[in-house]
Amino acid sequence: MNPEVSTPPADVRTSSGSIYDLGYQRYTGPRLGRAYAARSLYAHGLAAAFGIGRSTRSKVIPMGLFVIALVPAVIELGIAALAGGILQPVRLDNYYSLVGTVMLLFCAAVAPELVGRDQRNHVLSLYFSRALDRRDYALAKFGALLTAMLLIALVPEFVLYLGSALVGADPIAYLRAHLDQPGPILASGLVTSLEVATVALAIAALTPRRAYATGGIVAAWFIADGLGTLVASVGDVAWTRYGVLLSPSLVSDGAIRWFFGTGGDEILLRADLPGWWYLVAALVYSGAAGIVILRRYSRIPA
């Protein structure tokens, strides 16, 4: 007697596969290349620096700090309008010393967002598998941060410059008498922004954790400032005056005073260093931080 052969139910699926023709075709359109990819990453980074294209919550800190940086200029213009220019507590040459902390906090908030998010989400391999190489990525992110810093540095200065002309009795005469000011304004904004942006991005690139990066940027800056001020202020030994070069804030302030041709605070006056030393020191800070950024992205796992 032959055993009965059972057949599987109709709803039992077999392990055989299926091939579907989805109509995939080779891309034959224009390939915009490496430069376009870098520009796109730069534009996206600049928009992200101010929270554009993201939630309202993402805009609060960068936009709020930008507005705070404008406050001293607005206050000075109000005083100038009421007092007729007799009182000038806020000037072009000391503006950055008043808003330096605001600029630092802006950079400490933005830099980790620009580079930390990509590390946390493990998307660097997607960037580097396309036309972008590692240097392009680093330079695009740095360019976005530097541009954002230039906006927060230069807009209040030019508001103060042009506003001072408008509140005066003769705006045209004021502008003619101060034609030499835009040059120092641009140079000061560039040097200050370059120094802060490179140092902040170098620290932010070292960790994907936003809190660690923000805390590291603020801590490193204030520790260096405190050390430089301490060394420059202790004793009368000749070499202690070079301690100002250890402080990034004093370095940028010294360069700004040199650009405008004005005197500095007590520590800078005591140091009595040539003005161009501060410019060279700021460029050394920026160059060293730039090397850290490039080396970081040449070795970072992707």
Image (tube, grey):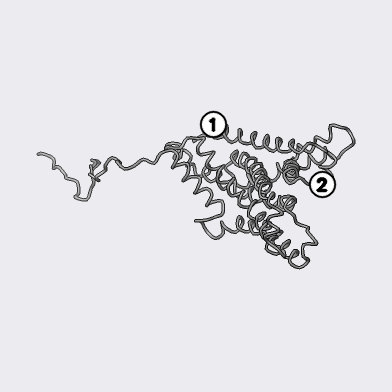
Crowding near the residue tagged with mark 1, few <14, some 14–19, many ≥20 C-alpha atoms within 10 Å: few
Residue nearest the observer in this picture, 165 or 95: 165
| Residue underneath mark 2 | 265
Taking the spot 48% from the left edge, 45% from the top edge, the residue there is: 41
Q: Position of residue 101 (x, y in %)?
A: 71, 51
Please tell me in which quadrant of the rendered image residue 196 appears.
top right
Taking the spot 56% from the left edge, 59% from the top edge, the residue there is: 57
Please tell me in which quadrant of the rendered image residue 287 appears.
top right
What kind of element bears circle 2? Answer: loop
Q: Position of residue 34 (x, y in %)?
A: 43, 38
Q: Position of residue 185 (x, y in %)?
A: 67, 49
Taking the spot 45% from the left edge, 37% from the top edge, the residue there is: 132
Amino acid carrying label 2: it is: Asp
**Between disc 2 and disc 1, whose residue precedes?**
2
Question: With respect to residue 51, does 285 lie above or below?
Answer: above
Find the distance from the CA under tag 2 to the CA under tag 1. Answer: 42 Å
| Residue underneath mark 1 | 299
Q: From the image, state whether disc 2 or disc 1 is nearer to you.
A: 2
Residue nearest the observer in this picture, 51 or 91: 91
